Amino acid sequence: MTTPPAPDGPRPAAGPPLAGPGGLLPAGPTLSLASHRGPHHAIVTVDGAIDYHTAPQLLGHLSTPETQGVPLLILDLARVDFCDSSALGAFVEIQRRRSAAGHRFALTGVQLEVRRILELTQLTSVLPLHATVEEALAANRP
């Protein structure tokens, strides 16, 4: 005797969903970071999503000698398409560390979706935002 299918039709077998090429799930969000250091600043260009999985990578990168000790740290988010509360926590932590050391911090190139999150959480009053890296450099000349 067989069990009749559920009223809304047959159910798939239990197990992880299959998606993407070859039926495999993507590994998760990825984040690329590139740094450039000038005489009085460091610019970190971020590409990808900043979330629970990648925020520790961002914080770790900002603890390297290349980004430490400069008066101004600029985080260029022009290629960041998503952030969650972990990203917001990372931004606040970076601002806290920089401020405690007597250094400045700025976000540039913030995309509309990320800006909306910053505005909804009222972090735009805490985190300096600039349209471009050049604007941030001009606003923070030594």
Image: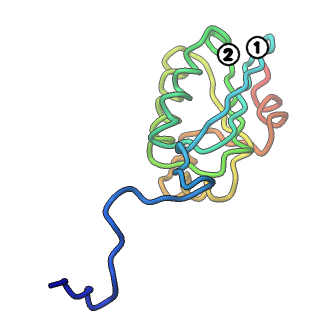
How many numbered tags mark residues here?
2
Relative to 18, residue 137 above or below: above
Judged left or right of residue 69, residue 9 is left
List x then y, in percent, for residue 57. 53, 28
Q: What residue is pinned by disc 2?
A: 71
Q: Residues within 10 Å of mark 1 (few under 14, many from 20)?
A: some
Quarter holding residue 44: top right
Disc 1 residue type? Answer: His
Q: Which mark is residue 40?
A: 1
Residue 40 in the image: x percent, y percent?
A: 76, 14
Residue 111, above or below 74: below
Front in this rendered view, residue 24 or 42: 24
Q: How is the image coloured?
A: rainbow
Instruction: Indicate the quadrant where residue 109 lies.
Output: top right
Q: Quadrant of residue 14?
A: bottom left
Q: Along the line of sight, which residue is nearer the eye, 50 or 9? A: 9
The residue that appears at 43% across and 60% down in the rendered structure is 17
